[in-house]
Amino acid sequence: MKRIIRTKYRILRFLSKVLILLLLTPLVYNYIPVQKGKTTFYLPSSDIDSVIDTLKENGYGVSKIDKLMLQFFKAPEKGWYSVKKIPKQRFTFFEKLSSQKAKTMRVKLYAGETSIELTKRLANDLKLKPKKLLQEYRRLTKYLEGDIIAGYYTVARKADERAIITALFQMSQEKFKNFTLFNCSATEPNELELKILLILASIIQKETYHKSEMPIIASVIENRLNKGMKLQMDGTLSYGEYAHKPITSKRIRKDTSYYNTYIHGGIPPAPLCTVSLDALHAALHPKKTNYLYFMLNKKGRHDFSASYKQHVKNIKAFRSKKKKKDSNRTQKTKPSA
């Protein structure tokens, strides 16, 4: 009997020690200060794993125990945060994190731009260094161009170059994922399919900014590819350092890269520029036509044709009107006798 009592006593003492240890551990842990990281950062999700990973990536000394403790607090929402002062108590840091929102502003990323143009414009808007922004872009890029979907984004006013580009990539990936979930079939597209979609959308984007024309140009691309024809589109030559430069007959002859669809079949090897959701939608849903050609007209839009004969007529009409317009301009600027 005494042996049983002694055994129960030992078990009770052991359990008491364990209980005291469990009670003391959080109290002791609470006074281990959080190592300070970057002041301003973007949280892409309120998921606890995402919160911990983001804090780690931004230099905050957090661990798996913090992940466990964070479950007892309200997780901060997705968005921009600015931590100016670290509380002495660890729990207070997580408790007050949700309220430390950063001041933000809205920026627009334009469709049809290269990464150099995008980062230069963004640097001007946010008073940041364009070279550093471009360096951060290239750190994360998959395709060199077209990684960030055009549109409006909310960014922190005082974030550094790394935080801004990282956040834009995260927000754009979410935007792209939502687009594919809504527009694609039940089967999730693989990486190659997504790349091809971006390439097609970038060709459409380079050829027109008019939303109504995009599905028609997409149909021309589809029809030509289905017939085994070369795309022969000027927009594919408007890439990298050649973006927004005139496409001359000399360029067409001299450029031997796979971006030159006058001499190579198929599509370019990578996206050409940032693309809009409209261009992506057109690439996924081409209009059903028999068009194989299109030509710019005097209104800044395009005339479409199914035959080469009609296409030649459209070319001649455009050149004739352009020649007449240039002649009239010359006469107006000519000094009077």
Image (cartoon, rainbow, N blue to C red):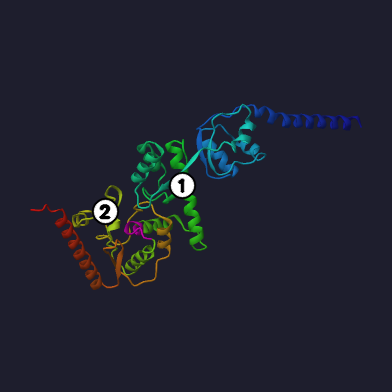
Secondary structure beneath dot 1 equals: strand
Along the line of sight, the residue nearer the viewer: 256 or 273: 273
Residue 206 colored in magenta in the image: yes
Quarter containing the N terminus: top right
Determine contact: label 1, label 2, CB under 8 Å: no
Asked if residue 140 is positioned above or below residue 284 in the image, the reply reads: above
Q: Is residue 329 left or right of residue 2?
A: left
Counting residues from the N terminus, which is met first, the one under dot 1 or under dot 2?
1
Q: Which residue lies furthest to the right in this view?
A: 1
Displayed quadrant of residue 313: bottom left
Q: Is residue 297 left or right of residue 280?
A: left
Q: Position of residue 70 (x, y in %)?
A: 64, 38
Along the line of sight, the residue nearer the viewer: 268 or 122: 122
Q: Where is residue 71 in the image (x, y as percent from the top left)?
A: 65, 40
Q: Main secondary structure of the magenta part?
A: helix
Q: Residue at x 18, y 55 (%)?
A: 250
Displayed quadrant of residue 330: bottom left
Q: In this view, does 72 lie to the left or right of 297?
A: right
Q: Callout 2, which amino acid?
A: Ser
* Residue 132 visible at all: yes
* Residue 58 visible at all: no
Q: Nearer the viewer, mark 1 or mark 2?
A: 1
How many marks on residues?
A: 2
Q: Position of residue 275 (x, y in %)?
A: 39, 54
How far is disc 1 from disc 2 in space, using C-alphas?
Answer: 34 Å
Q: Position of residue 86 (x, y in %)?
A: 57, 29
Secondary structure beneath dot 2 equals: loop
According to the image, label 1 marks what residue? Answer: 153
Mark 1 crowdedness (10 Å alpha carbons): few <14, some 14-19, many ≥20: some
Q: What stretch is highlighted in magenta?
A: 203-210
Residue 257: mark in rendering:
2
